Image (spheres, rainbow, N blue to C red):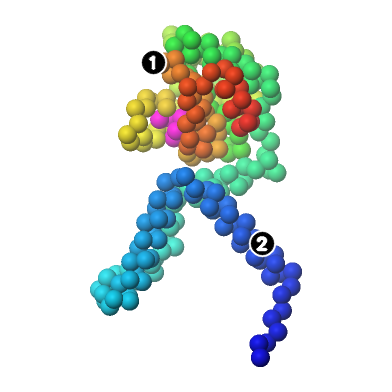
Amino acid sequence: MLEHIAFDWRDALDITVVAVLLYQVIQMVRGSRALTVLMGLGLLTLLYFVANAVGLYTLTWLLQHVFSSLFLLIVVIFQADIRQALGEMGARPLFHKHNVRRDSVEEMVTACVEMARLHVGALIVIERGTRLGDMIQREGVRVDARISRQLLMNIFYPKAPLHDGAVIISRDRVTAAACILPLAEAKGQNFGTRHRAALGIARESDAAVIVVSEERGEISVVFKGEFMRSLDGRRLRQVLDEIL
């Protein structure tokens, strides 16, 4: 006869928390580079069971030693993804408010559309929950001014002293200009310096980045490592409203 198994609220809470964490992990790795790494680890696990069943002792011994350090391997392989995930957990609206006013969004959209028409390059980083100070390789010139179309266009005017670098927008204000961002590797992609810088900061934080291409007169938004390209004014406004 089976013994009576007690199931109380602690067990229900335990199962719920584990299910939520697993769901968050799946959401984090879905469509990312981490998914391919996990698939590789899954293939190694399958290879281990096959080698053990067939009797390939050397291969089994080798894989056993690999899996004995699995936790350390996961930390090393996924260090950037883990850092980004933890940063996003701390950047939830429960802890931070990162809304940008609608009139500020309109000023950014108007400036970007006009700069795209004139083929003026621009890189605008909108800080959300994750603070960007330790991710900027060289902090630029402190501005601390209200967001306006005229200010953004003056900063990125090709002959202006602050045009080379990124503008940082934080707490609904232009806080700094001419900031140097980390460059991301973009193998197989024909990306310029601005797009690589946008991808680099977007992979390391939850910031939204607007890129105006000087060569093509094209507006792009980078968010969580994903590019949204060839945006017109209406679509740019819609994307920013959804993110911010």
The reply to whether residue 14 is visible in this rendering is yes
Q: Quadrant of residue 2?
A: bottom right
The quadrant the C terminus occupies is top right
Q: Is residue 217 magenta?
A: no
Q: Is residue 69 above or below residue 53?
A: above
Location of mark 2 (residue): 16
First in residue order: circle 2 vs circle 1: 2
Residue drawn at (33%, 76%) of the image: 53
Residue 215, numbered label: 1
Q: Which percent across, then down, holds residue 194?
A: 42, 25
Residue 109, numbered label: none
The quadrant the N terminus occupies is bottom right
Instruction: Identify the residue at the far right of this view.
Output: 9
What whole-number distance in Å separates the C-alpha atoms at marks 2 and 1? 51 Å
Q: Secondary structure at mark 1?
A: loop
Query: Left or right of 76: which side holds 234?
Result: right
Residue drawn at (36%, 36%) of the image: 185
Q: Is residue 141 above or below residue 44?
A: above
Principal secondary structure, stretch drawn in magenta: helix
The reply to whether residue 73 is visible in this rendering is no
Q: Which percent across, then down, holds residue 47?
A: 33, 66
Chain part drawn in magenta: 196-200
